Image (tube, rainbow, N blue to C red):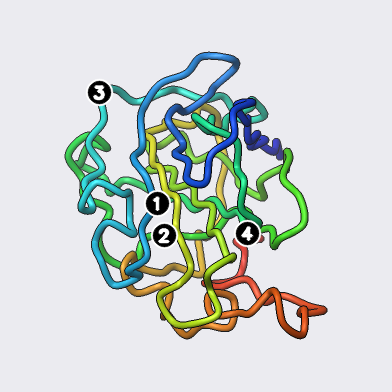
Amino acid sequence: MQFPTLLLLLAPAANGHYAFSSLVSNGVMSYYSKGTLTDVLSTSIRCNFDGATKSASTKTVAAGSTVGFTAVTSISNSGTLKFYMAKVPAGQMAATWDGSGNVWFKTFGQGPGGLGTSALPWRSQDRPFLLHFEHIALHSASSAGGAQFYISCAHIKVSGVGSGNLGPLVAFPGAYKATDPGLMINSYYRIPTCYTLPGPGLWTD
């Protein structure tokens, strides 16, 4: 089994809001994202642009290679980092499939306290996938709807041979509620000593 690695690359500027503008695969960048979202029931929670998943191309990524997203400014807010994937159904294309339904599985999740690289527990199935990245800023999350989502998606095709049962599967919207413990949290008063990642468990099969 080989483990693709996700790498978060940060630009050196400073700003209160940020966007993840490019997919990075072996140093090559492509794709774009706009800014913050707060409504977990919006279709935009799927891939930002009103739920649209359209992109100019699909990037072929070999199992074991490095992929990630760049931020156009520095990530100035503490929060949680997650990656999800969704396998494009047989007979459909990543460029036209909307990613709706219970099709998304979490491949990486990290709470507040640092960002970096991580191996994904993902066996290649030589199929196209949608790759969803999100950073959730928690500095205003003391009330429901205060968590700020910064989301980007890309189309990737994983080359190689593999197997595995994907899951647990969730939908966007539907994976989160505004009152989930990991999305409604006061990080200033009575500072939490633990953190519960919102959403499903990690795919481990």
Mark 1 or 3: the one toward you: 3
Numbered-mark total = 4
Circle 4: residue type? Gly
Which residue does the numbered mark 4 point to in the structure image? 79
Vertical side of 193 occupied by 40: above or below: above
Q: Earlier in the sequence, mark 1 or mark 3?
A: 3
Between the C-alphas of marks 2 and 1, the distance is 5 Å
Between the C-alphas of marks 2 and 3, the distance is 22 Å
Q: Earlier in the sequence, mark 2 or mark 4?
A: 4
Between the C-alphas of marks 1 and 4, the distance is 23 Å
- Give the quarter of the figure containing the C terminus: bottom right
Circle 3: residue type? Ala
- Give the quarter of the figure containing the N terminus: top right
Mark 2 or 4: the one toward you: 4
Which circle marks residue 56 in the picture? 3
Circle 2: residue type? Trp
Q: Residues within 10 Å of mark 4 (few under 14, many from 20)?
A: many
Residue 118 rendering spot, x and y as whole percentages: 73, 43
